[in-house]
Amino acid sequence: MRTPHCSTLFNVVLVLFFLCAATGLAADAPPDQPPGEKSEVVVMPNSMSEIKAETLPAMTLVALSMSGSYEQHGAAIGKLMMYTGMSGFQMTGGPFGIYLNSPEEVAEDSLLWQVCVPVAGVTAVEKPYELIEMPEMLAAYGICTGPIETTDPCYGVLFEWIAKNSYETAGPLQEHWLTDDRTTPPEENKTKIVIPVVKK
């Protein structure tokens, strides 16, 4: 798992779940494409790898609770990282998200989620931030490679693996962003998807 160093985390704002579709008229259409027709953009599907289940260690988190659209991710992470850096907290890993419900369950304005960063030696934070003690947990996880806004196929693979291996989900899912999508080609972005589980 690649995590930024503390000195760079302060300056890194990951922009998540931002959909940008740009299509236009082709200036020089290929011979088999009539002039004036739109070019079709082919997006390769995300792939899932390295799926396993293991006990993850306890963590202390500085968290910012959010509601509503996931398009707020960039601003929320920027705010969290600015506060964490200015407070001089010792960060022990990169930022990640915790999702308390999903668009399949509720309307967009009812979505509940948190952006978090693991820290060490922190005993108190200022509002609206929260200090969360995340306990040790058994979790299934895998690495999803591809655009960060199209991770749904990876979730399907991971949930199928959970069911086939006699586990069931036991808590909110997490997304750990292992690459900076501002500088990484979309097809090379890596997201670690973590789902707490229990054995059936």
Image (cartoon, helix red, strand yellow):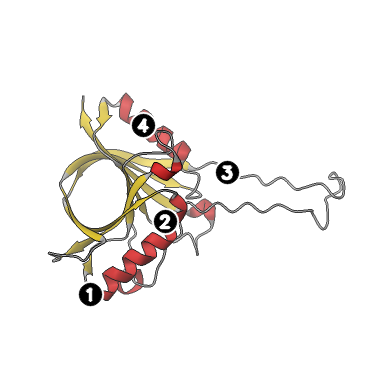
**Which residue is found at the position 45% from the left and 49% from the top?**
69
**Which residue is found at the position 82% from the left and 46% from the top?**
37
Locate the N terminus and report the quarter of the image it occupies. bottom left
Q: Earlier along the polypeptide chain: callout 1 or callout 3?
A: 3
| Foreground: disc 2 or disc 4 | 2
| Foreground: disc 3 or disc 2 | 2
Q: Circle 4 — which element? A: helix
The image shows residue 169 at horizontal and vertical percentages of: 27, 32
Q: Viewer-proximal residue, 103 or 39?
A: 103
Q: Which mark is residue 159?
A: 4
- Horizontally, residue 160 falls left or right of residue 187, namely left
Q: Give the Cα distance between marks 4 and 1.
A: 38 Å
| Foreground: disc 1 or disc 3 | 1
- Horizontally, residue 65 falls left or right of residue 27, namely left
The amino acid type found where label 2 is placed reads His
The residue pinned by badge 2 equals 73
- CB atoms at circles 1 and 3 under 8 Å apart? no
The local crowd at label 2, few if under 14, some if 14 to 19, many if 20 or more residues have their Cα within 10 Å, is: many
The local crowd at label 4, few if under 14, some if 14 to 19, many if 20 or more residues have their Cα within 10 Å, is: some
Q: Give the Cα distance between marks 2 and 1.
A: 23 Å
Q: Which mark is residue 44?
A: 3
Q: Circle 2 — which element? A: helix
Q: Give the Cα distance between marks 2 and 4.
A: 24 Å
The image shows residue 99 at horizontal and vertical percentages of: 33, 44
